[in-house]
Amino acid sequence: LGSQELCLLLFCFVWSSICFVWSSICFVSSSICFVSSSICFVPSAICLVWSAFSLFLHIC
């Protein structure tokens, strides 16, 4: 693993954790919260796919 891949994975993990905490706090709140957590989860999903893809390229 290169430092770039590792850094990206770490960033993804931190971002996903923040999102998870945010949505957990927000869960008791309204649908506005659901929208904001969805906006939050989209970049983390893209991030995880990107890091998996770069990892695959690194292996191959």
Image (cartoon, rainbow, N blue to C red):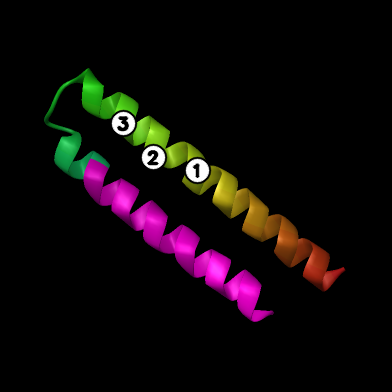
Badge 1 amino acid:
Pro
> Which label is found at residue 23?
none
Where residue 43 appears, x then y in whole percent?
50, 43
State if disc 1 and disc 2 touch (CB < 8 Å).
yes
**Is the residue marked by circle 2 packed among few (<14), some (14-19), or many (20+) residues within 10 Å?**
some
Residue named by callout 3: 36
- Judging depth in this view, the residue of 25 and 2 nearest the camera is 2
**Is the residue marked by circle 3 packed among few (<14), some (14-19), or many (20+) residues within 10 Å?**
some
Against 16, residue 4 (above or below) is below
Q: Residue at x 58, y 74 (%)?
A: 6
Q: Residue at x 48, y 48 (%)?
A: 44
> Which label is found at residue 43?
1
Badge 3 amino acid:
Ser
> Which label is found at residue 40?
2
State if disc 2 and disc 3 touch (CB < 8 Å).
yes
Task: Assign the magenta stretch its main secondary structure.
Answer: helix
Q: Is 21 left or right of 7, judged from the image as shown? A: left
> Distance from label 2 to label 1 (Cα)?
6 Å
- Report the residue that reaches farthest toward the left: 28
Residues rendered magenta in the picture: 1-22
